[in-house]
Image: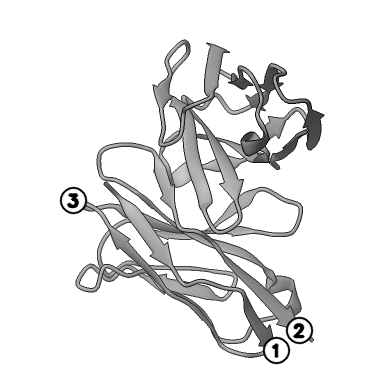
Amino acid sequence: DVKVTQSSRYLVKRTGEKVFLECVQDMDHENMFWYRQDPGLGLRLIYFSYDVKMKEKGDIPEGYSVSREKKERFSLILESASTNQTSMYLCASSLSTIGYTFGSGTRLTVV
Amino acid sequence: GDSVTQMEGPVTLSEEAFLTINCTYTATGYPSLFWYVQYPGEGLQLLLKATKADDKGSNKGFEATYRKETTSFHLEKGSVQVSDSAVYFCALSGSRDYKLSFGAGTTVTVRA
C-alpha cells in the first residue's frame, strides 16, 4: 500500500516562527498536494506539485510556500506563523485522480 | 470554478438506520466524483468513486450514483453501524487536472 507520512501529528508554534511541515510518500507518485482542513470549510488546497522542483498555487496560498527538491518529499512552509494558520494540515499524493492517498495529518496550533 | 455542496450535519442515527448524505456539484466538462471518509484521528480514505455519468460507485455497503442531469452524487447506506461514525466528504476532480475540490464535510454519528 502507498504510504504518505507526515512528520508530526501535533505541533505548537509561536506567532512569527517559521514552520516546516514535512510529507514523504513511498510510491513514486508525481503529484503531491497540501490541504488545510477547518470545521465547516472542508479541505482547501494550499499548494500542489506535479513534478520535482515544480509548484503551483492552490486556492489559499497566502502566507505559505512549498519546496519539492526530491520526488518523494513535499514540504509546506509557513514563513511567519500567525494564529489564523491554526488548523489541521493534510498532505496527499497521487498518480491520477483515482489514486489519492492522504497522510494522517498534522494538527498545528499557533499561539 | 468547480465546487461541491454537501448536506450540512451533524447527522445522528441509530444503528441499522438508513443514511443519505446529499452532494451536488458545479463543474465544466465531465468531472470525476468521489466520496472520502475520515475516521476519528485519521486522514482521509477513498470510500468510492465514479468517473462518468450513470456510474455507480460502491464499497462497504455504501453506494452513490453519478447523476449528470441533476449534477448530484448522493451517498447512501441501507443499514449503518456504529463503526460508520465518521466525517464524510464529497469531492470532484475536473476533467483537465488532478486537483480535488471538496465539500465542507458531514459528520455522522451512529448510536448503538
Tell me where residue A11 sits by quadrant: top right
| Label 2 chain ID | B
Q: Residue A101 carries which label?
A: none
Callout 1: SS: strand
Tell me where residue A82 sits by quadrant: top right
Q: Which mark is residue B29?
A: 3
Pick the residue in front: A37 or A1.
A37
Residue receiving disc 1: B14
Pick the residue in front: B42 or A99.
B42
Q: How crowded is mark 2: few (under 14 residues within 10 Å), some or many (20 or more)?
A: some
Callout 2: SS: strand
Asked if A82 appears above or below A35 in the picture, the reply is above
Pick the residue in front: B41 or A12.
A12
Does B9 sit left or right of B7 as displayed? right
* Amino acid, disc 2: Arg
Task: Name which of mark 1 and mark 3 comes first in the sequence.
Answer: 1
* Amino acid, disc 3: Gly
The location of residue B3, given as percent across then percent down, is 34, 54
Label 1 and label 2 in one chain: yes
- Give the residue at x 44% y 57%: B34
Residue receiving disc 2: B111
